[in-house]
Image (tube, rainbow, N blue to C red):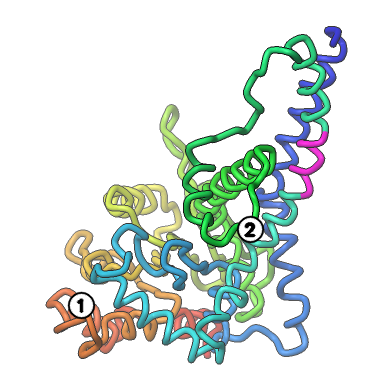
Amino acid sequence: MDEDGLLESEESATADKKAVDRAFGAENRNRLIDAYFAPSAAQGVSPGNAWEHVYRLLLWSDPTTGLAHCYESDKSQPGKPWYARSLAFHDWLCRALNVEPSELSHEIDWLFLKACSDLADALLRREARLAEIAAQQREPYGDCSFPEPGADPELATIIEETLRPYLTKDVQEEVWNALTQKVRQFLAVQNKRKNLVGEGFEDVLAQVVRRACDVPADAILTRCLLYEIPGFNRARQGAKENKVDLAIIRPTMRTLVTAKWSVRADREKQFTTEYDEYINAESENSKFQYVFVTNEFDPARLMRACENLHRNSLMFDYVVHINPEAVRAAYKEGQAGHGRMTATQQRVIKNMESGRLIGLEQWLRNLSGQ
C-alpha cells in the first residue's frame, strides 16, 4: 500500500474512533434518554415513578452473578455476604417492577444496551475497512504461517474444554479466532460502562428533574463550571475551575448536586473540599443547597454521607438514595446468609426513619413543592 493509502486508512481509523467515542458521548446519551422517555410522555414522569425509570435506564446485571448489581462484583460472588444481599435486592426489584427474576436483565440497562448498539454499527464499519487493509499488509508474508490476528489459543482452549462434551464435531481454528475476538470486544465494551454510568447518571437525573418537577431545561445544568451558576465567582487566577455534576437554578434556591452512582473511598474526601470551594465562591451571601444523590449500598459510606459534619453542621442538605426500600431489602435480617444486621446498617436504617436519608421520590417532591 502506498503512503497515500496508508494516510487515508489512518484518517478512516481516526474517524471511526470518533464514531465509537460518540456512541457513549453526552450528545448521543441525551438523544437516547429522550428516545426512552418519548413513549412515557402520555403517562408522564412523576416523583413516584422516577426511581423506576432511573433503574430501567442505568441499573445492570452483574455478568458474574446474573443478579442486579448493587455492590462491588468481587464482594458479591456466591458464598460471600453480599451475594445474599444481592439476591435480596434482585428479589425486591423484581417484585417492585412485576418482573420474573429470570427476565429482569431484559428490563434494565436500557441506556448502555442502546449505546452498545450504536457502537456495534460503528465497529462493523471500522472492522470491515481494517480487515481489507490488514489483508494487503499481510500479503508479503503469505507463505510464512504467521498467526492470525485476534488469535488467543489460551482463551480458545478454556472455551473448548468447557464445551467439549457438547460439541458434535471439531471446530475450525478460524471460528475459535472469531469467537475469542468477540469475547475480547465484549469485555472492552463493558469497560465503557464506568463512563456511561458516571456521566449518564447526571444526564438521567437532569431529565428526571425536568420532567417530574416541571423545571425549565435552561434551569438545569450538567457538568457546568461553578461560576456559570448565578451567584458564584470564578476561581482565583491559576486555581482549577470547579465543575458541578448537576445544578438546579430556581428563583428561590440554587441546588448544587453531587451525583455518584457509587462512592469510592477517595471520592468521599473530595466532598468536603468541594463544599468549602462552593462556600468560598458564593457571592450573593444567600443560602444554596448541597445535595448528594446516589445508588450506593455500602452502609459505612451511606452512614458517613448522612452524618458527616462541616463546621459543626450537617454537610449535605439532603442525602438521596434512588430508592431506600432497596437498601432496606438488602440489609434485611433473617434471610439465609444475612445473620443479624450490623450496627452500621442499623444506623443507616435509623437515618431513613428520621428522614435524613430520603428517596428520589421525596427529594423530587421537595423540589416541586408537593
**Where in the figure is residue 319, as x and y percent of width and height?**
35, 72
Identify the main secondary structure in magenta: helix
Outermost residue to the front: 169
Residue at 41% of width from left, 67% of height from top?
Answer: 65
In the rendered view, tell whether residue 147 sits above or below residue 289.
above
Viewer-nearest residue: 149 or 125: 149
Tally of numbered discs: 2
Residue at 71% of width from left, 45% of height from top?
Answer: 22
Q: Which residue is mark 1?
A: 345
Question: Does dot 1 land on a helix, a strand or a loop?
Answer: helix
Q: Is residue 51 left or right of residue 173?
A: left
**Where in the figure is residue 267, as x and y percent of width and height?**
33, 50
Residue 25: assigned label:
none
Q: Which residues are magenta?
A: 121-128
**Where in the figure is residue 269, as x and y percent of width and height?**
27, 50
Q: Which residue is mark 2?
A: 168
How many angstroms separate mark 2 from mark 1 (CA)?
52 Å
Residue at 63% of width from left, 48% of height from top?
Answer: 170
Viewer-nearest residue: 48 or 187: 187
**Where in the figure is residue 32, as x and y percent of width and height?**
72, 63
Inspect this view and state whether residue 74 appears. yes
Question: Does dot 2 land on a helix, a strand or a loop?
Answer: loop
Name the amino acid type tagged 2: Thr
| Mark 2 nearby-residue class (10 Å; few <14, some 14–19, many ≥20) | few
Residue 82, located in which quarter of the rendered image? bottom left
Viewer-nearest residue: 90 or 173: 173
| Mark 1 nearby-residue class (10 Å; few <14, some 14–19, many ≥20) | many
Residue 237 sits inside the magenta stretch: no
Name the amino acid type tagged 1: Gln
